[in-house]
Image (cartoon, rainbow, N blue to C red):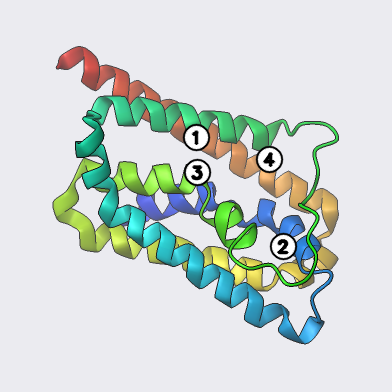
Amino acid sequence: MTIFSAAVLLFLVLDPFGNIPFFVTALQNVPRERHKRVIVRELVIALFVLVVFLFAGEHILKALQISEPALRAAGGTVLFLIAIRMVFPRPGASVGEELSGEPFIVPLAIPYVAGPSALASVLLIMNQEPERWPEWLAAVVLAWLLCGLIILASSVLARSLGKRVLIAIERLMGMLLVALAIQMLMTGIRQFIKS
């Protein structure tokens, strides 16, 4: 895996276009002049959580005695389930959580940006080749930065692109993520059979 492919995987998992409606809904009771400040704060918290998981994940795996093939297969399965929900969302699913006041950490930073799939992905990436940690850190920051730029423009994008285009983009990202998830699952199974 290269920095670019890791960054693309993380970008797809972070799902910035799918998060636009959630951010717009969560910030509707927050004064407009505070939107950017709140979004930046939540994105920084999410990055902190992702980086902590990037570096602490290996120790968690060792403590739980989870092998790399098992992690790959599990990561692929989790990503597949998330990708399926992106492509085929549940009918009547709520766009966001009911919030009173300004959101803090939950739900914007966690789980909308640094959700279970993103945390599992950084853990999996780091576990493959821990000695390449500077590259994985760069991939996390790159994916987060691209995601952050899109989310910062969430209200403008929501107005200009419209709901149908955002849904189409999320479905396309979901399809790419399905393919990546299947590849991860197959690689995990192949590694298990060889060991």
Question: Mark 1 against mark 4, which lies toward the viewer?
Answer: 1
Q: Viewer-proximal residue, 54 or 190?
A: 54
Question: Mark 1 against mark 2, which lies toward the viewer?
Answer: 2
Give amino acid for label 3.
Answer: Pro
Reply above or below: 9 against 195: below
Whole-angstrom CA distance, mark 2 to mark 4, is: 18 Å
Whole-angstrom CA distance, mark 1 to mark 2, is: 22 Å
Task: Return the x and y of residue 67 as percentages of the image width and height.
Answer: 22, 28
- Mark 4 is surrounded, within 10 Å at the Cα level, by few (under 14), some (14 to 19) or many (20 or more) other residues, namely many
Which one is earlier in the sequence, the residue at label 2 or at label 4? 2
Residue pushed farthest bottom? 33
Task: Return the x and y of residue 129 as percentages of the image width and height.
Answer: 18, 46
As helix, strand or loop, the secondary structure at mark 3 comes to helix
Which one is earlier in the sequence, the residue at label 2 or at label 3? 2
- Mark 1 is surrounded, within 10 Å at the Cα level, by few (under 14), some (14 to 19) or many (20 or more) other residues, namely many
Whole-angstrom CA distance, mark 4 to mark 3, is: 19 Å
Whole-angstrom CA distance, mark 1 to mark 3, is: 9 Å
Q: Which residue is mark 1?
A: 79
The answer to which quarter of the image holds residue 73 is: top left
Reply above or below: 13 against 192: below
Q: Which residue is mark 3?
A: 116
Which one is earlier in the sequence, the residue at label 4 or at label 3? 3
Q: Which residue is mark 2?
A: 23
Question: Mark 1 against mark 3, which lies toward the viewer?
Answer: 3
As helix, strand or loop, the secondary structure at mark 1 comes to helix
Give amino acid for label 2.
Answer: Phe
Q: Which residue is mark 4?
A: 171
Q: In the image, 67: left or right of 117? A: left
Residue located at (77% from left, 69% from top): 27
Q: Viewer-proximal residue, 90 or 168?
A: 90
Residue located at (79% from left, 76% from top): 30
